[in-house]
Amino acid sequence: MLPDLRRILDGGQGVLDTAAAVRAGLSADDLRRAVSAGELRRVRRGLYAAGAVWDAAPPWERYRLTVVGVLAAHPGWVASHHAALVLHGLPMHGIALASVDVAAEVGTAKVRPGVHVHRLARDDRHLRSADPRALPPAVACAQVAARDGVEAGVVPMDAALHEGRCTRSDLRAALGHPSTGHGVAHARAAVDRADHHAESPGESRTRLLLEPLGVEVRTQVDLHDAAGLIGRASPSRPERRSGRRAGFVTPSLLHRARAHPSGSPAEPAEPGRPGCGSVAGRPGHRV
């Protein structure tokens, strides 16, 4: 690999654009040779990524690299929508990764190949020098919910609340952001359904799937016996017996854990089964 090419890639998180390559003294022939040799991967027109980095990256990481490269080529742009989510490290679900959403000082929104340029609100102009260069988590979550639906919004909202990236008040305030005008009803519904206890997209999606069935779901429920905490079930469904609440959908798991005081491993729960999930707790009780 050319020394200048390696230096640019190291300084640009594994990506570079044509303009940066030219400024560093690399020619179009240099870039073509690097692509032919597998040292670079052409991500999109004018944007390249280190071959080894790109080949090893999962789809969401490839998307993050693409967003980083697009912003590097346009210093005045700010990531928005799911492009902002990926820079904040928040999970995404049900969102196409074919386009990068950004906000810029433009008169009207523009759609270019692979890029959707939105108007940058006056109050957000200071974010052009932020790190990451992206709209706040609450605004990005509301944008995604407004455009892509309730489930697409709840998944990152749950994570943002759980990780302390924003508060419910921040999410409600984000409903008034200019970019959430269309679809604000979806965004409002997502905020109403967000749960800061959820620790994974699977929990968030399971809760939303069970909700229309009239099933009450509680996330991250601690299970105790006389000796103390056994573990935590997520998510759990309150269950009634003899006209009163008797526990959760995991009573068999609780009984199984109590039946193995010596630490013998219990039978693993069925992966992905709603109501069981995983229970992490006392050593030797893996259910």
Image (cartoon, rainbow, N blue to C red):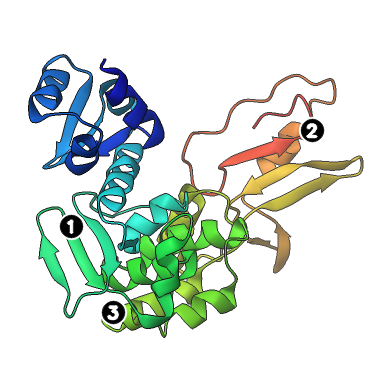
Name the N-terminal-most of marks 1 and 2: 1
Viewer-side residue, 89 vs 214: 89
Discs 2/3, front = 3
User: Which residue position is annotated with label 3?
Assistant: 183
> Image point 74% across, 50% down: which residue?
222
Q: Secondary structure at mark 2?
A: loop
Query: Is residue 278 shown to the viewer in this render?
Result: yes
Provide residue 192's location: percent of width, then percent of height: 50, 76
Q: The residue under label 1 is which amino acid type?
A: Val
Which image quadrant is residue 195 in?
bottom right
Query: Is residue 210 shown to the viewer in this render?
Result: no
User: Which residue position is annotated with label 1?
Assistant: 115
Discs 3/1, front = 1
Which image quadrant is residue 51 in?
top left
Against 15, is 131 above or below?
A: below
Viewer-side residue, 250 vs 167: 167
Give the CA separation, mark 3 to mark 1: 21 Å
> Image point 11% across, 17% down: which residue?
36
Which image quadrant is residue 74 in?
bottom left
Discs 1/2, front = 1
Against 155, is 190 above or below?
A: below
Give the CA separation, mark 1 to mark 2: 49 Å
Provide residue 139's location: percent of width, then percent of height: 43, 71
Q: Secondary structure at mark 1?
A: strand
Q: Secondary structure at mark 3?
A: loop
Against 97, is 101 above or below?
A: below
User: Which residue position is annotated with label 2?
Assistant: 282
Pointer 2 local density, CA inside 10 Å: few below 14, some 14–19, many at least 20:
some
| Quarter of the picture holding the C terminus | top right
Q: The residue under label 2 is which amino acid type?
A: Arg
Against 241, is 14 above or below?
A: above
